[in-house]
């Protein structure tokens, strides 16, 4: 039995969706393991997505030339962030693992009452514009405050949340083949880089491999069921999983933040680059954003 | 003199920001050329960022199992989308060029009254979590409706907006060196792929090279001025610029949406992959998301 705390940040408008089913499975399996599971159901909460001066209680420092980065940092230091942000920050501080369960896709299948069936073709649209929906982007923009979630010194492998784990769990409308290095949407590893490196790893999180539900809307009912079953199986061992690999902060110099020459040399004869982003003008390491140990 | 229509979708909270100055420069130079320039100032408009059932006027088809993709498509067909969405769609329909002018960055410099100066170090934070701020993501999620902006048949090089141009114009907090293939944030071309391919090119837009203002917050006042000057110079010829290259839709088969064997073969001996996403397990083509003709 575990005594870990898990926060699921969940973004879907409907309780009948595949995403809801995936979220419910996570709550059920992790709770049964002894975890305390908290869910931030962003649409149900009517979570405010835009970063504005209203996020700061009382007077801001410079109303005329409002700077969100600066003002929110100050408000965080002084305990003056709005109640909704402080509540989410408190949940995040408590949590050992954060799962972002989202419709990263325009289309989604409703298990009980499929709604996206007007088209005779499967709805092969890409992820939610290759990123997270605005309501989750708003959670990221507002909750991961400067000072609370990162600082100039504490980021990447030295990040504030380096003792926590985080992962993306999402559905696609597109088939897996469409998100390959030869597919029309391009390599899924490329699309995941800004999300996993630029948000999660930037704050220091150990990033677990994403849970990708490929095109449930194009799948047979039994295949959708087995997708959920395999997620339930994975959830059993989720807390023991090794995270994805990223490059340690000390591999970079501290002026131009370039790879140090010795790291460069060490990898000169290697076939692949180090990561999707830091690829040294070599082929991308296959699956580095999708599987641990790559 | 031009008679083109330009829409600037602008997302910054403050009129004293560098982004405001960049937006104002675009309005001024393009208007002087005879263009009609419209600005959607998202924060000033209090633009709603989250995609919800309230975006549909009257009753939705399936309130219990609400599916945004389906319901918004239907509402668009029946003229039942909310007034704010319809207004933006009308601006977009009219426009020949759309410029997204955004603080893609957590930090931003206020030209008249620098606000982000508490730190002794320059604020080298990455783009707005390697993506657009939530309010602009909300514009994308809500305005680029299924049917209006894309369909199963009309996307990528066959996309609905193939006769229009679009581009990103943004500031970074990070230095240029940090966004290189050997820099800590990884190659900027990778970060741009989901935005430029997954949103702009997906809808068919001819994507102009991004205007990147590298780290104005770390630059001297005179360097910031010359950044704006070079933007003004570029704006003079912007409407004549060649767009970035993407792969034509007919290079992919229409089942698995994989590159056709003949395209594969043709590029077998080439040094670089075709695009950042469709890289054929080869090195990424340098600058393909940043310069035309790459």
Image (spheres, coloured by chain):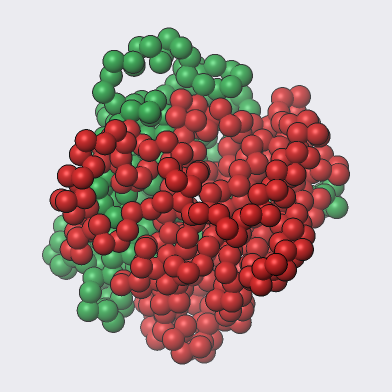
Chain colours: A green, B red
Q: Nearer the viewer, residue A131 or B64?
A: A131
Q: In the image, what residue occupies the spot 47% across and 83% down? A: B76
Q: Position of residue A220 (x, y in %)?
A: 15, 67
Q: Nearer the viewer, residue A53 or A258?
A: A258
Q: Residue furthest front?
A: B1
Figure check: A168 above or below A217: above
Image quarter of the C terminus of chain B: top left
Q: In the image, what residue occupies the spot 35% across and 71% down? A: B154
Q: Is residue B287 left or right of residue B19?
A: left
Tally of numbered tags: 0
Does residue A157 appear in this view? no
Figure check: A203 above or below A221: above
Q: In the image, what residue occupies the spot 48% across and 69% down? A: B163
Q: Position of residue A294 (x, y in %)?
A: 27, 29
Q: Nearer the viewer, residue A292 or B241?
A: B241
Q: In the image, what residue occupies the spot 63% across and 28% down? A: A152
Q: Position of residue A186 (x, y in %)?
A: 32, 49
Image quarter of the N terminus of chain B: bottom right
Q: Position of residue A19 (x, y in %)?
A: 34, 61
Q: Is residue A185 left or right of residue B109?
A: left
Q: Nearer the viewer, residue A257 or A232?
A: A257
Does residue B279 appear in this view? yes
């Amino acid at each position: 039995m575990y005594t870990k705390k898990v926060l699921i940040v969940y973004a879907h408008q409907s309780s009948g969706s595949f995403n809801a089913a995936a979220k419910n499975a996570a709550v059920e399996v992790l709770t049964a393991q002894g975890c305390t599971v908290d869910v931030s159901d962003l649409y149900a909460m009517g979570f405010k997505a835009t970063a504005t001066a209203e996020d700061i209680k009382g007077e801001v420092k410079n109303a005329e030339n409002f700077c969100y980065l600066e003002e929110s940092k100050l408000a965080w230091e002084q305990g003056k962030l709005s109640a909704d942000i402080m509540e989410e920050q408190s949940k995040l501080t408590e949590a050992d693992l954060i799962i972002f369960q989202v419709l990263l896709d325009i289309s989604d299948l409703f298990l009980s009452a499929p709604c996206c069936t007007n088209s005779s073709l499967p709805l092969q649209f890409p992820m939610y514009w290759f990123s997270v929906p605005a309501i989750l982007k708003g959670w990221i923009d507002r909750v991961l405050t400067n000072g609370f979630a990162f600082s100039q010194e504490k980021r990447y492998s030295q990040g504030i949340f380096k003792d926590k784990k985080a992962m993306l769990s999402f559905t696609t409308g597109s088939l897996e083949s469409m998100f390959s290095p030869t597919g029309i949407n391009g390599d899924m590893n490329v699309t995941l880089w800004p999300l996993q490196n630029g948000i999660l790893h930037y704050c220091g999180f150990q990033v677990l491999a994403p849970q990708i539900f490929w095109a449930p809307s194009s799948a047979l009912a039994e295949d959708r069921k087995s997708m959920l079953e395999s997620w339930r199986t994975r959830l059993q061992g989720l807390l023991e999983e090794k995270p994805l690999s990223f490059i340690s902060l000390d591999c970079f110099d501290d002026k131009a933040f370039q790879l140090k020459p010795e790291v460069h040399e060490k990898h000169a004869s290697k076939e692949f680059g180090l990561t999707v982003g830091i690829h040294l003008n070599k082929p991308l390491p296959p699956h580095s954003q999708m599987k641990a140990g790559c």
